[in-house]
Amino acid sequence: MMQALESTHDSDWVLTHEGYSVLTENAVESRFALGNGFMGMRASRPVSRGPTWVSWQGFVRWASWPRCYVAGLFDRPNTVPPVPALVPVADWSRVRLVLDDNSQLMMDGEFLSSVRQLDMRRGILLSDLSYRAHAGITINGDELRLVSLADRAVGLQVLRFSLDRNGIDVMLEANFAMAGMGMEPLQLDRDVCAWRTEGSHKAVAMAGSATLRADGHPLAPERSFSLRWIWRWRSVAGQVLELDRLVTVARSDGLADDPAPVASDALARSRALGWRGVLAAHETAWQQHWDASDVIIEGADDEIQEAVRFAVYHLTSAANPEDESVSIGARGLTGDAYFGHVFWDTEIYLLPFYVAVWPEAARALLMYRYHTLPGARAKAAAMGYRGALYAWESADTGEETTPERVVGPGGETIDILTGRMEQHISADVAYAVWQYWRATGDEGFFADAGAEILLETARFWASRAVPEADGKRHIRHVIGPDEYHEDVDDNAFTNVMARWNIARGLEAIEVMRARWPDRAAALLERLALSEPELADWRDAVEHIVTGLDPTTGLYEQFAGFYKLEPLDLSLYADRKVPIDVVIGRERTQRSQV
């Protein structure tokens, strides 16, 4: 037992955080979060008081934010702005320990020590604490927590603790905090519960079992509650109590689908293995991933090596090759930021890793973009263009989910233009499709999905790049990756990528015709792509403005960028915040930054 609750001895594999501070707790819970691409859990302490606010320097923010998330579980909660958001499921790690009927851990007493460790090699969260309650009673405890990489429906928690006093009346409650919050209950049984979201009508089921042992002997809980167990006993000094809890989760997207049997079956599988078997399978799965993806930097200090493994750990935790209906949001499954929405970051920054070491995950992420093509087509049509314009912020359907406006810190209304103007996302998706195809040679993907993405995004850009009197084709009123400058013309990144996208669309047609002529003809017919339209594509490739100065080899970032105020950024090298916070938004927009 103790070996399971000990971290990997090599410090390059372990992140350690000692103590507790309301100013850093939120960040620690994010950094130490667990995930497997289907389920994600923040690293909040199991005995915490739940969501906790803190006021600091005039700002009110969350100090602790215990949350568990399921990929793809989006709804339109009562939030501002009212956009689809990833909604949390019950936090299944909560425990409540009460001594002599009046002293609750975290409510009455003080921590003598508190250490959390993220063992990246094993994909587990370890916690160790020593707590002095009223009358000097000391509780020492350890926790192991994981969400299984071997069976993505499964979560495990093992708690081991002891008291230093005899004769204390102890109550331990293991529960699912905030179960079904904001959802309609469908089933509330002893070992399995299910709920449905109110707007999107998706369903989620959670099943669980919990066992408490005193020095290895099982203790019977009080009468059963739905996913809630309570034990009472009288303490013996030094007696070791061990709680193991197995949890399983299932999601369904259709009204006719019931996730409860899926969760129940997963619970039966995990109970047959026992918690040690669940842990062993999980550790084996992580080791297989590390064998394929670990990066060792010769001569690097521990901090650099640790940072690289931290990145690989979270990349591995974020992806699920078994589900083509979901992608990876800007915060993965580690928090609520950006409502769980998917951005271009997934295709440009994350996908190269998956293509190199985990192509099955890369394929699933690209199939998400294929399944959301209808939303991209609808957005393009609504803006008066052909083809597919992907959502700048995407949830589960592919519709544009970027808020149109938000309320600033001073109460002012701020218009958000990225959903309308940051259109390079379509070329970014096409780029990822092409890179995956080139690296893997996955012909099934290319013929079934990839080629269609390339053609529909190329079609969008050909309609977007408008011929003008100078004989060139321009793309006006956009936002490039530099979001400091909004509503610009001929952003170099956007235009170069658009031109590239159209060229790859034409090349994709040639590949299809050469390898699968019948399928090529059927695809072109289904998309109603005519030879005159393809001729227009070729014209676009030849005439789109790129901003390249052939004499210097430099690209002007966008039309008129060189006329903006030069800014010596070395004067602001020590800043800790974005440059627009330092010099103001208006000056930033007038500057070459």
Image (cartoon, rainbow, N blue to C red):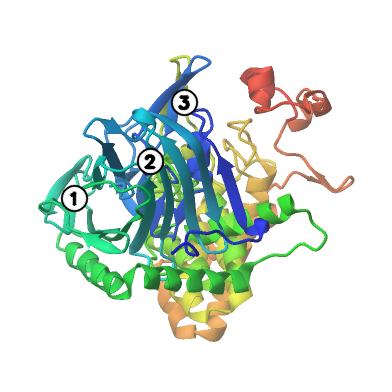
- Quote the CA–CA distance across marks 1 and 3: 33 Å
Vertical position of residue 355 compared to residue 143: above or below: below
Q: Residue at x 66, y 61 (%)?
A: 10
Vertical position of residue 568 compared to residue 497: above or below: above
Circles 1, 3 touching at the beta carbon (< 8 Å): no
Q: Helix, strand, or loop for circle 3?
A: strand
Image coordinates of residue 182 in percent, x first then y, are 22, 39
Q: Residue at x 46, y 67 (%)?
A: 452
Can you identify the residue that label 1 sits on?
Answer: 196
Q: What residue type is labelled 2?
A: Pro
Please tell me which residue lies in front, 365 or 57.
57
- Quote the CA–CA distance across marks 2 and 3: 31 Å
Q: Helix, strand, or loop for circle 2?
A: loop
Q: Is disc 1 surrounded by few (<14), some (14 to 19) or many (20+) residues within 10 Å?
A: many
Q: In which quarter of the image is the C terminus?
A: top right
Left or right: 348, with 406 as reference point: right
Vertical position of residue 325 compared to residue 333: above or below: below
Q: Helix, strand, or loop for circle 1?
A: strand
Q: In which quarter of the image is residue 371?
A: bottom left
Image coordinates of residue 374 in percent, x first then y, are 36, 57
Q: Which mark is residue 66?
A: 2
Q: In which quarter of the image is residue 256?
A: bottom left
Circles 2, 3 touching at the beta carbon (< 8 Å): no
Q: Earlier in the sequence, mark 1 or mark 3?
A: 1
Q: Quadrant of the N terminus?
A: bottom left
Q: What residue type is labelled 3?
A: Asp
Please tell me which residue lies in front, 459 or 425.
425
1 vs 2, front mark: 2
1 vs 3, front mark: 1
Left or right: 247, with 513 as reference point: left
